Image (spheres, rainbow, N blue to C red):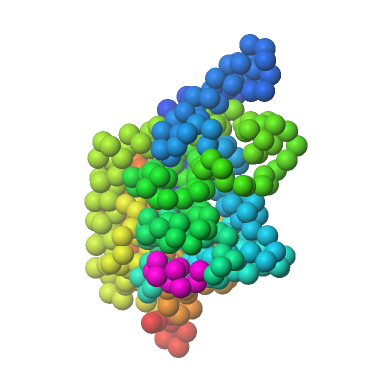
Amino acid sequence: MRRVYCDANATTPLLPEVMEAMRPYLMEDFGNASSIHLQGQRARKAVDGARETLATFFHCREAEVVFNSGGTEGDNTAIFGLVRAGDHLITTSIEHSAVLRAAERVAERGAEVTFVAPRANGLIDPEEIRRAVRPTTRLISVMLANNETGVLEPVEEIGKVAAEAGAFFHIDAVQGAGKVEFDVRRFGCHLCSISAHKMHGPKGVGAMYVRRGTPLEPLIVGGSHERRQRAGTENVPGIAGLGKAVELAMESLADGTIARIAALRDRLEAGVMRIAGTGVNGAGAPRVANTTNIRFEQVEGEALVIALDLKGVAVSGGSACHSGSTEPSHVLMAMGLDKNAARASLRFSLLRTATGEDVEAVLRVVPQAVEHLRALAPVETATSF
């Protein structure tokens, strides 16, 4: 059976070039990057080279790049590292749980938090952010691209609101990094989080942009690593892999790969939409090239995920962090969908290596699976909207 993986927003496989970049630091060049002997200096050279690549990617100074364990740590660091009791945090109701749960935690500790809701198409209105600003607003945190719908948020405009308010601005760019033109100076942010495994790099490693002068309290302490901004022995193979993944992502933005993926996504979306009783969540809003979120009338989303998996197609009902949850997507609910429509929605997210043959294989099985499940669904319990 041919298998097609359409869950890139959950994670991606290593590209061969990334694996090759990591291999020496898993074997012969295994040293600790803080050691001054030859093995340590070889490791340090790998970390420094990756930091230079990340600085080019972010459009920042090398000293403003901090390596960490990934997007969750970066999001947590931004919030816990800046927000204290009495401060005001503005974020949105469609953020990743790494931001939402951190926001709830600082609220329990005495901070005030405002969750701004999106429009029906998933876009955050910068004016709603502006209206939420208070004299005590310390931090504004908004994602670049939504992990479930792919909707791109107007972070440049929100950055201007933050600047006018004198507030710090954090961007969770985990799903947008490597898929759109990237420049933290243009975004106007003080902090930006990315993760390697969403862009064909290894799991368990990521990076943050931390603008010089930002008074960020480290989340992890214990050593002088990363200029005392993140303690712990550097994950040298992971950092080398992240550097290579970012290098390849920058090339894909320049060589037409992203445009090719967007065309494949549009072809997949158009084909699925030929099925009666379907709709695109986030339609009309700008989206990252690889993502579409589609709802299916009279179908239970989890059952469709299983049915497609049995036919060789891997998709998702939403964020991988909530896999197995019986609750409908908080993102889709915030966009105004009812519970039935939210539960009837699937996310298709393409790998950078996706092909036209992959799309055709998906389009051969989705209509069959939907038809089969609709035939099985009792009329009185069918999901409809």
Farthest bottom residue in view:
380
Figure check: 125 above or below 159: below
Nearest the viewer among 358 and 15 is 15
Figure check: 261 above or below 115: above
User: Which residues, given as a range, are shown in magenta?
Assistant: 125-133
Q: How many marks?
A: 0
Can you see residue 248?
Answer: yes
Magenta stretch: helix, strand or loop mostly: helix
The spot of residue 142 in percent (x, y) is 48, 59
Which residue is painted at 52% across and 48% down in the image? 191
- Kindly indicate the quadrant of the structure image that contains residue 123: bottom left
Nearest the viewer among 224 and 99 is 224
Question: Horizontal placement of 153 versus 227: left or right?
Answer: left
Question: Horizontal placement of 336 versus 359: left or right?
Answer: right
Nearest the viewer among 300 and 249 is 249
Question: Horizontal placement of 223 versus 369: left or right?
Answer: right
- Kindly indicate the quadrant of the structure image that contains residue 225: top right
Farthest top residue in view:
38
Which residue is painted at 52% across and 58% down in the image? 167
Can you see residue 19?
Answer: no
In the rendered structure, does residue 379 fall within the stretch colored magenta? no
The spot of residue 375 in percent (x, y) is 38, 77
The spot of residue 153 in percent (x, y) is 39, 60
Q: Quadrant of the C terminus?
A: bottom left
Which residue is painted at 55% across and 48% down in the image? 71
Which residue is painted at 37% across and 55% down in the image? 156
The spot of residue 76 in percent (x, y) is 62, 53
